[in-house]
Amino acid sequence: MHLEYPLSVLFLMASVSGGIQRNTQPAQLFLETGVLVGNSGGLTGHATGEIKLRVQQRLLRVFYQQPYRRVGFEKPECDRIGAIWRIQYHHRVVDPDTGIDLYLDSAECTGNTDSSIGQSNDVVLKFFDFVAHQDFLSAYRLLDPERRLAQDLESFTSDLTPYDFSQFLSFGLVIPCTEVKDSSPQTVDILAGPACFINEQKRPTAWEFRVSLKKDAWQIVSFYHR
């Protein structure tokens, strides 16, 4: 992977009275490869936000400011939850207001995907897409059989009717709006936050899903909104 900032020229920047002062101590660089489980800033690489990367058993949270270098992002799946990224980032002194100390320099899409995270997240997005198109039966069929036994289609539809899913089609399918909260090879917990634009009386809502692999298919075991 090409390093955007060679170690010899990357320095910490500190704000001081009268302008910017360079810290003569080079910042420490890191390279990591992991699964994208959250991205709060959109797709362009020219925004401000935070990525969350699952690196083995660790959750790596890296802040970014515009711009950061993006390599190999020609395919749309590169920005989807479950994509495997290789990133370069550096450490700074902790910001006392935000607690942020890791900053993204560049990201490379490897072209690979973690199947359990990617497929379970796709189920949640399909669920919202079906409901937004008023196709409640297809959404209902994404529930696992035990969940369907606990609630019939009529009650399921009635529970979802008060919510406005229409803006999800314009925003939630375009930018990453979900985040993996916990995962195992068989079960994934997913949060769909306000960025999915699902509203109740024009107020944003958040939804939590548990999706499990059963009989070679990912199915929604439970969901609730708050």
Image: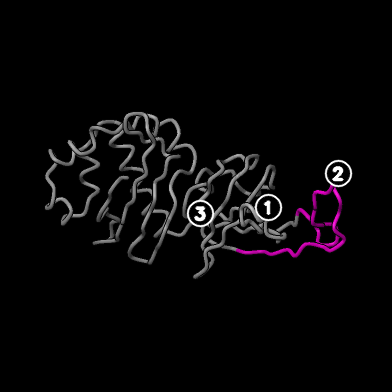
Magenta stretch holds residue 30? yes
- Give the label, 3 or 2, closer to the camera: 2
Q: Residue 147 location, x and y as percent?
A: 18, 53
Tell me what residue is drawn at x 37 percent, y 44 percent.
206
The local crowd at label 3, few if under 14, some if 14 to 19, many if 20 or more residues have their Cα within 10 Å, is: many
Mark found first going from the N terminus, 1 or 3: 3
| Alpha carbon distance from label 1 to label 3 | 15 Å
Tell me the tag on residue 106: 1
Residue carrying label 2:
19
Does the magenta portion include 79? Answer: no
Residue 83: image tag:
3
Which image quarter holds the N terminus?
A: bottom right
Name the residue: 75% across, 65% down: 28
Amino acid type, mark 1? Ser
Say whether disc 2 or disc 1 marks the residue closer to the N-terminus: 2
Q: What is the secondary structure assignment of the residue under circle 2?
A: strand
